[in-house]
Amino acid sequence: MNAHILFGTQRRYPALVALGGCLLLLLAAVVVAWLVQRAFGNVEVRNARFDNANGIPIRAKLQRPVAAVEDSPLPGAVYAHGYQNNRETNDPYCIEMARRGVVMLCIDAIGRAPIPV
């Protein structure tokens, strides 16, 4: 196969259609992932940052069921990842716990990711 056959104009249109289809599929996957992480509107997800007792900043993700309000509190839990992971590897567990009515604080171990200033 030579370059004329590979890069000819007769093959350009199907390639552009395939690229467009892949980009639409990618966009749909991003939207579905965003909805799943928020349990389709039943869980509020926020990034959190706080200092530990030694003054070292800790990064975390707070996943709160929307039913948890000041007048009607729900139980909470802190989830810490294992060795060679980060807070995003815990998302499936934390999302499921939040869907079931537990406020989850998924912390990132010290030194796992840079803390933005």
Image (tube, rainbow, N blue to C red):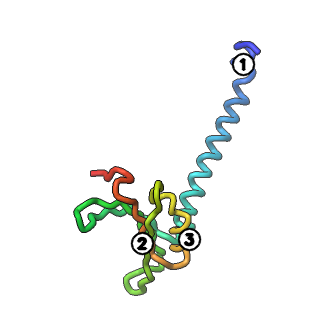
Q: Position of residue 101 (x, y in %)?
A: 51, 79
| Amino acid type, residue under disc 3 in the picture | Glu
* Alpha carbon distance from label 3 to label 1: 48 Å
Q: Which mark is residue 17?
A: none
Q: Position of residue 58 (x, y in %)?
A: 32, 61
Residue found at the very far bottom of the displayed protein: 71
Task: Indicate which disc, 1 or 2, sits on the residue closer to the N terminus.
Answer: 1
SS at mark 2?
strand
Residue at 57% from the left image edge and 55% from the top image edge = 31
Where does label 3 land, which residue? Answer: 96
Where does label 2 land, which residue? Answer: 78
Residue found at the very far front of the displayed protein: 83
Q: Residues within 10 Å of mark 3 (few under 14, many from 20)?
A: some
What is the quadrant of the N terminus in the image? top right
Q: Nearer the viewer, mark 3 or mark 1?
A: 3
Residue at 67% from the left image edge and 31% from the top image edge = 16
Task: Indicate which disc, 3 or 1, sits on the residue closer to the N terminus.
Answer: 1
* Alpha carbon distance from label 2 to label 3: 14 Å
Where does label 1 land, which residue? Answer: 6
Q: Position of residue 24 (x, y in %)?
A: 63, 44
116 with respect to 16 (left or right): left
Task: Indicate which disc, 2 or 3, sits on the residue closer to the N terminus.
Answer: 2
43 with respect to 32 (left or right): left
Residue at 43% from the left image edge and 76% from the top image edge = 77
Q: Residues within 10 Å of mark 1 (few under 14, many from 20)?
A: few
Query: Which image quadrant for residue 50?
Result: bottom left
* Alpha carbon distance from label 1 to label 2: 55 Å
In the picture shown, does residue 70 fall above or below 19?
Answer: below
Q: Residues within 10 Å of mark 2 (few under 14, many from 20)?
A: few
